[in-house]
Amino acid sequence: MKKPLLLASLLVVLLSNNIFSQSSKYGWLCQESWDLGFGFAYPRYIATDLRGGDFGSYGMFLSIKRNFSEHFGFRLQSNYLHIADRQSVFLSNQNSDNNVPKVENDILLASLGMVYYFSPCEPISPYAGIGAGGVYYRLKNSPIVVTATASQSRPLDKAQTDYELDAFMGAEWRVAENWKLKTEFGYHNAASGKFDGVYGTSTGGGILGGHGDTYMTFDLGLVYYFGYGEKSHICEIYEGINSKVDYDKIEEIVKRYKVQPSEVDYNKIEEIVKKYRCASPPAPTIPPVPKDNWVLVGVNFDFNKATLKPESIPILNNAVEILLGHPDVKVEIQGHTDNVGSDQHNQILSLQRALAVRNYLIAKGVAANRLTTIGYGKTKPIMDNKTEYGRSMNRRIELKVIK
């Protein structure tokens, strides 16, 4: 059973690569949305005077959630749970474990919780939350007998109500357009110690403290997203030179501000041409080539990334201007990293950063045979790696003039 689940999880990861997770529509993240969830649940006691074993427990869940932003939402969830657990021998007044009756609990739960998504832009979106709810449950084979008078003894096998606090964490895995696979672990703390049919909890209470019974649930199901809001822009990260251009917007601006035709004074134009026809334009000033290693200050990278950041473009454009003005100069593009990670990983990452810069320079017109690349990994820091600022400066690019 474990192997098919593992293979299915790996397939989900492969299919969902580069797809936004939390509330996607046509491949992009929304600022707000609604979703509907449903699936199976496996419940089990944690803090209880019963045995805490697996004796045929099962359940299901149904939820609806309102996502108010890319990270935050409120969820209303209902559960039907059936928890079956055997009594301890000392509770059942028997000398052996044979034929010890099961205490069964049928539970209807409705809870309201707050949900926070940690990485809404990723294909696998982890989340956590807290909440509270009301519980309606009915016990069967409870070992506790409630006695009002000597003639009115009865077991605790009747409908009960209670409230509880909940904490949960899980992840949503994209499997299709608008559909996610939900995996979640929940921790539930009832307010009283009779939830399991046994008064008190000798093993200790949960998040409410005292002797309240606690139980856990494992949810596996699907989530369907609908009711989308506006498109979110928090995931629009610069990806090399393939930036997104809204050509419709540009055309609209051109049409709005274009100048209407007017009469042309050709005599005035001829006068101006005669006045300046002997004047030659000044020669453009070509920036000099640095003599030593040429540190591209400002061309830095995020941790464990080789993607050019938007603020790097002006610095790279200046390097393009210098190289195009000196066509006989060849340079070696040197990539560097901070000291986090193994030597082999950082060497590969530094080379990827150098290649990203090389590709940009080639795209801007610099001949490929003038550019070579090398990755030095973490071997040549220029600042102290003990600080975040120092590490960010060490994730850099240098140009070494060869000729």
Image: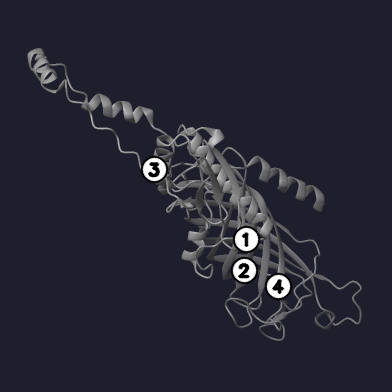
Disc 2, SS: strand
Please report contact status of discs 2 and 3: CB closer than 8 Å, yes or no.
no
* Percent of width and height locating residue 137: 64, 66
Please, which residue is most extreme toward the bottom here?
Answer: 150
Alpha carbon of mark 4 to alpha carbon of mark 2: how far? Answer: 9 Å
Give me the disc on residue 108.
Answer: 1
Marks 4 and 1, the one that precedes in the sequence: 4
1 vs 2, front mark: 2
Q: Amino acid at mark 3?
A: Asn
Identify residue for label 4: 46
4 vs 1, front mark: 4
Disc 3, SS: helix
Give me the disc on residue 57.
Answer: none
* Percent of width and height locating residue 104: 75, 66
Alpha carbon of mark 1 to alpha carbon of mark 3: how far? Answer: 67 Å
4 vs 3, front mark: 3
Marks 1 and 3, the one that precedes in the sequence: 1
Marks 4 and 3, the one that precedes in the sequence: 4
Alpha carbon of mark 4 to alpha carbon of mark 3: how far? Answer: 64 Å
Marks 2 and 3, the one that precedes in the sequence: 2
Identify residue for label 2: 188
Alpha carbon of mark 4 to alpha carbon of mark 1: how far? Answer: 18 Å
Identify residue for label 3: 318
Q: Is residue 19 visible?
A: no
Q: How many callouts does the rendering have?
A: 4
Q: Amino acid at mark 1?
A: Leu
Alpha carbon of mark 2 to alpha carbon of mark 3: how far? Answer: 60 Å
Q: Amino acid at mark 4?
A: Ile
* Percent of width and height locating residue 380: 57, 60
2 vs 3, front mark: 3
Q: Amino acid at mark 2?
A: His
Please report contact status of discs 4 and 1: CB closer than 8 Å, yes or no.
no
